[in-house]
Image (tube, rainbow, N blue to C red):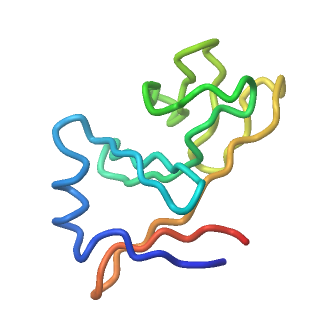
């Protein structure tokens, strides 16, 4: 896994997420959604595995699934699995808050 420093502190992350509690970051060609929901930070690929539509406009439901705004496909924020097995799984990324900043871990 390769780690990327996104912000200098958790406060920087909170500021970037804003009132909406979401931000998209770009690492090379990859776009990753950062969401804050019910006290937890989440990081996942921007594109829905079903139809490659942006998940940035989606919402997190009460089951802690990101819901694609295009066709309603739901992906677990714990492991990325599509809840009905109708498409491939979503890639979930590690997000760590450390003393020296906020880091995003991407698998090679």
Residue depicted at 19% across the width and 65% down the height: 12
Q: Quadrant of the N terminus?
A: bottom right
Residue 44: % across, % down: 55, 49
Taking the spot 16% from the left edge, 55% from the top edge, the residue there is: 15
Query: x%, y% of residue 21?
Result: 27, 41
Is 46 rendered above or below residue 107? above
Is residue 70 positioned above or below 13 on the image? above
Q: How many marks?
A: 0
Q: In the displayed structure, would residue 35 be above or below residue 53?
A: below
- Residue 60 occupies which quadrant of the picture? top left
Q: Quadrant of residue 71?
A: top right
Comparing 97 with 52, the one in front is 52
Which of the image's four quarters has the C terminus?
bottom right
Q: Is residue 19 left or right of residue 26?
A: left
Residue 57 is left or right of residue 44, and the answer is left
Q: Residue at x 29, y 70 (%)?
A: 7
- As drawn, the residue found furthest toward the top would be 71
Residue 48: % across, % down: 65, 32
Q: Residue furthest bottom?
A: 100
Q: Left or right: where does residue 86 sit relative to residue 57? A: right
Query: In the image, residue 52 lies at what x, y percent?
Result: 68, 29
């Amino acid at each position: 896994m390769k780690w990327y420093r996104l912000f200098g502190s958790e406060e920087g992350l909170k500021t970037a997420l804003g009132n909406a509690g979401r931000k998209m970051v770009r690492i090379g060609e990859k776009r990753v959604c950062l969401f804050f929901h019910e006290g937890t930070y989440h990081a996942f690929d921007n594109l829905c595995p079903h139809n490659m539509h942006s998940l940035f406009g989606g919402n997190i439901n009460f089951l802690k699934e990101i819901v694609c705004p295009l066709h309603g496909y739901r992906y677990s924020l714990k492991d990325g699995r599509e809840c009905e097995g109708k498409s491939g799984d979503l890639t979930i990324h590690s997000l760590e808050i450390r003393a020296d900043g906020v880091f995003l871990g991407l698998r090679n």
